[in-house]
Every structure is written in structure tokens, then in C-alpha cells.
């Protein structure tokens, strides 16, 4: 349940729980490949006049490719969610979700979407010691060395190499 009636909140805190399918329209256009449903849980309560605080948790797993070797990887994502909703149009805080005037139902979906974007890792490695791909032949170096010969230095760096040698001799 990601929609809560404001009249219900006036009576006390409300537990929230939902299981959103990975292909739910809420997650369209995120650029994140969800591998399982997003499980949302929490509690929302009044936090003063015309404001409500939602503390919750979201859990799922995302799939992508390793940043270095392009191997498919699936990683769990879990995030604590602390969100303030307010009816105060004068609020300058961009982290506060504004509640439009005459709203009867508070929708937590935009907060879930945003928190999922923030929680999903930007760059994933298949493992910490991933060696990546050979820049010349493209072989996965995690499977062993490639057959490329020793790298020939770019002649444009020869001036810096000479300077380095000269500075090392002066030491």
C-alpha cells in the first residue's frame, strides 16, 4: 500500500507495505534493470502541522554488466528511506516532497522511485580484483593472459620518458 489517506494519518501512524513488480510502470525509464520485485515496507506518521514523516526500507536486486570485463552481474540493493512530506509551499528544502493543496491521499510512489535511483549502484564490478579486458585484443584477462606481445610505448610520450630518466639520475 503506497497510498495513504490523510484522514487515516490523523488517527495515528500507518504501516506501509508493497511488493512492486520489476516491470511496474513506476520504474519505466530508470535505466536500471530490476531482477526481482521491489519490496517496500515502513511506517508513516504525522510530524507536525501539515507534515508527515515516512521511515521505511526498500529491497530488490539489479542487473548490469561488470564495468571492467562486461560480465553480467546481479547485485542486491537495500536502502533505508526517510522522507518528509509537507503541505507548506514555502519550504525551500528540496528533499521535502510537497503535498498539493486539497490532497486527500498521500502517494509514496515518487519517493520510492527516487530512493531506488539513489540506492542503485552506478558502477558494479564482478569482483574486486577484476582484471578487465585487454585493450588491444579484447580478451577477458580474468580467464588468463592474452597472446598480445609486450606493449610498445607511444612515441608521443618519449619526451616525458626522457625527462623522467633525467630526474631519476639527478636524485
Image (cartoon, rainbow, N blue to C red):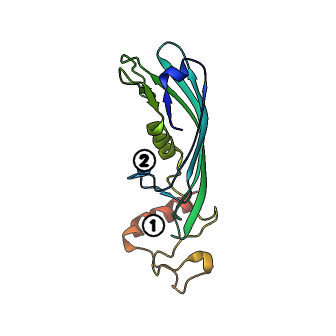
- Residue 154 in percent (x, y) is at 40, 73
Quick one: SS at disc 2? helix
Query: Which residue is under mark 2?
Result: 26
- Where, by quadrant of the figure, is residue 163 drawn? bottom left
| Badge 2 density bin: few <14, some 14–19, many ≥20, Cα 10 Å | some
Q: Is residue 44 above or below residue 137?
A: above
For the point 49% across and 53% down, which residue is it?
122
Q: Mark 1 to mark 2: distance in Å?
A: 58 Å
- Residue 54 is left or right of residue 161, and the answer is right
Residue furthest top as drawn: 49
Write the residue at 50% across / 20% down: 7
Crowding around mark 1 (Cα neighbors within 10 Å: few <14, some 14 to 19, many 20+) is few
**Quarter of the figure that contains the N terminus:** top right
Q: Which residue is mark 1?
A: 162
Q: Say which mark, if any, is on residue 149.
A: none
- Depicted 127 relative to depicted 3: above or below: below
Residue nearest the viewer, comparing 144 with 71 = 71
Mark toward the start of the polypeptide (1 vs 2): 2
Q: Residue at x 50, y 55 (%)?
A: 22
Front residue (pair 171, 158):
158
Q: Residue at x 46, y 16 (%)?
A: 50
- Quarter of the rendering occupied by the C terminus: bottom right
Residue 6 horizontal/vertical position (percent): 48, 23
Residue 117 drawn above or below residue 96: below
Residue 130, percent across and down? 60, 67
Is disc 1 placed on a helix, strand or loop?
helix
Amino acid at each position: 500500500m503506497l497510498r495513504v489517506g490523510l484522514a487515516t494519518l490523523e488517527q495515528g501512524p500507518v504501516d506501509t507495505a508493497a511488493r512492486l513488480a520489476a516491470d511496474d510502470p513506476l520504474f519505466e525509464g530508470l535505466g536500471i534493470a530490476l531482477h526481482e520485485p521491489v519490496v517496500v515496507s515502513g511506517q508513516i506518521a504525522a510530524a507536525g502541522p501539515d507534515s508527515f514523516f515516512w521511515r521505511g526500507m526498500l529491497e530488490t536486486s539489479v542487473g548490469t554488466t561488470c564495468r571492467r570485463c562486461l560480465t553480467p552481474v546481479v547485485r542486491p540493493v537495500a536502502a533505508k528511506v526517510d522522507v518528509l512530506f509537507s503541505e507548506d509551499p514555502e519550504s525551500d528544502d528540496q528533499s521535502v516532497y510537497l503535498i498539493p493543496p486539497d490532497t486527500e491521499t498521500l502517494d509514496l510512489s515518487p519517493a520510492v522511485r527516487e530512493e531506488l535511483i539513489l540506492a542503485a549502484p552506478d558502477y558494479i564490478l564482478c569482483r574486486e580484483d577484476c582484471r578487465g579486458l585487454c585493450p588491444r585484443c579484447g580478451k577477458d584477462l580474468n580467464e588468463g593472459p592474452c597472446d598480445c606481445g609486450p606493449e610498445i610505448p607511444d612515441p608521443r610520450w618519449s619526451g616525458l620518458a626522457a625527462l623522467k630518466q633525467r630526474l631519476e639520475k639527478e636524485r
